[in-house]
Structures are given as structure tokens and as C-alpha cells.
Image (cartoon, rainbow, N blue to C red):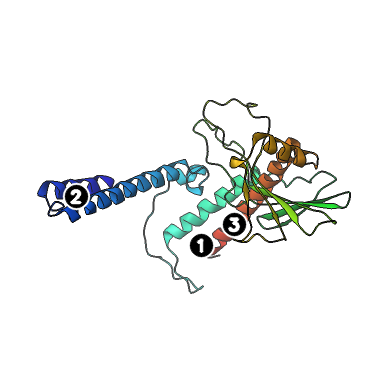
Amino acid sequence: MTTSIARTFQRCLMSGSFQKSASYGKRIDYNAANLSRLAVAQNQSASLMRSYGRSIWYMASSARNYKSTNLWPSVSCTCGSFHSESDKEFSHLLMDEIKGEKERMTGVPTPSSSWSLKCNGPDCKMTKKLQGDTIEVSFNVNGSVPPAREDAVEDEPIIAQPDFMVDIKKPSSSDTLSFECYFPDEEPGEAEGDHPNVFSIRSIVLNKGEVTDATYIIDTENIDPNVYDHLLTYLEERGINNDFADELVDIASGVENHEYIKSLEKLQNFVSCD
């Protein structure tokens, strides 16, 4: 489609349809920019689709040989819904995928003794007390699995690295100090251990329990490096360190795997007619 857009634009330039007046010259620049942005967006979309790490159509070996029959149902169904032969094949494929995922399934680890864990589906919160202070770490595993690397080994364990929020509450203050943290992407050519910290701080904010448009947020990209280092130390002294980050990844990976299997089972029940 990008080639078709480019050819159409070229024909318009050759025919002079964009050169009738000076005002049309501005439209040429505008339209050209739009066409260029459309082409880039389409290329980025295609690249994203190629890099998407886990897909039920490519993980199961049977999916690679899948061919749609596009047949109308040969047997009438008593459930009142439409079903085709393709639906039946899809249902069987999902059953194989669920079986394979359960064979590789790992449970959700129990957090260390100082932390408690509560999950509502993909939404999780870890809490602990520290001499009257309350520390809460919340995260959601939706969209937390990074795209598969080109050198990824088949059947490599799925690792979830969700962004997480750290909320620190003191009995002596009505404010909550919130840290937005994330796991940075590995840059090409970087070796393991190049960065002393497993996670990074994206922003911090003092709030009254709710962040609104009227709440000022400090972006860590614009602060002094010494201030940033002291923020990391502040978290580390409260147990938010590299060991905790590794523990959070293990918990998030277990929760994500569990929720993925549950969703596949729901999808299989939806498309099948048992």
C-alpha cells in the first residue's frame, strides 16, 4: 500500500495538479508530509506485528500447519450459535496450546516474609509496614511481556516486567510519596551488569492519594544525577532494591502465565460447542 501511495503522489507531481498556484504549493508540502507519516506509521505497525513475542498462532506447532477450510457447518448445532469447521479446528488448536502452557506453568511465588500480596486478576499489590510507615507496590501484568528477541531460544520462559508504582505513606503526613518505576530496555551492545540497578525511576510525585492534572509530577530525566541517586537510596533503605525487583519479576511472571492460561480457557469455551 505504501508503494501505491508513492506512485499516486508521483503522478500528481508529474501532471502539475499540485502546482496551479502558490497556495497549492503549501498543500503539496502538507499532503507530502501526511503521506510520509502514513508510510512510516504503516512500516512501524508492520514491524510491531513482526516483533510481537507471543502469539497462539505461532507458538503451537499445529498452528503453523493451520489452513482455514471456510466451510459452512455440516451439522446443525443445538446451541443456537453459528459454528464452522474452522471453529472446530481453532478450538482444538486452543486445547493444544492450553495443554502446552500448563506443562510449562509455574506457580506464583510467595513474597518474602515482610511483604503481603493480593491480586485481582492481572492487578496486584504488595504491602508491608516499616516502623509505622506503609509501603505499597502496585503493578498490572497486562502488556508486561517484552517482545521476543531475535536470538530467543524456543520454549524460553516468558518473563513479565511490568511498570510498578511505589507509594510510601507516613502517619505524620497527609501526603503520599509515589515513585513510578520501570524496567529499562536492554540497549544493543550492552552486557549484563552494565547497569547497577535492575529498575529505574521514571517520575516521583507528592499527592493526597490521587494524582490529577493539577498535581505537579517530577520527571527524573530533568533532575540532578545526585538527586536521582539519593532517590534510589531512599527506596533501597525501604527494601525496594535489586533483590526486590527480581522477586517482583518472578511474581509478575507467574501471575501473567496464570492469567494467560485462564484467558485461553475462556476463549476455547467461547469458540467451541461442547
Looking at the picture, which amino acid does disc 2 mark?
Answer: Thr
Residues 206 and 147: in front is 206
Residue under label 3, please give it. Answer: 263
Mark 3 / mark 1, whichever is N-terminal: 3
Residue, disc 1 = 271
Of residues 230 and 189, which is closer to you in this image?
Answer: 230
Residue at image coords 14%, 54%: 21
Asked which secondary structure carries label 1, the reply is helix
Label 3 and label 1: CA atoms lie apart by 12 Å
Identify the residue at horizontal 40%, vertical 47% (top origin).
45
Amino acid beneath label 1: Val
x, y (%) of residue 157?
62, 38
> Is disc 3 placed on a helix, strand or loop?
helix
On residue 8, the disc is 2
Pick the front one: 217 or 256: 217
Closer to the observer: label 2 or label 3?
A: 2
Q: Amino acid at mark 3?
A: Ser
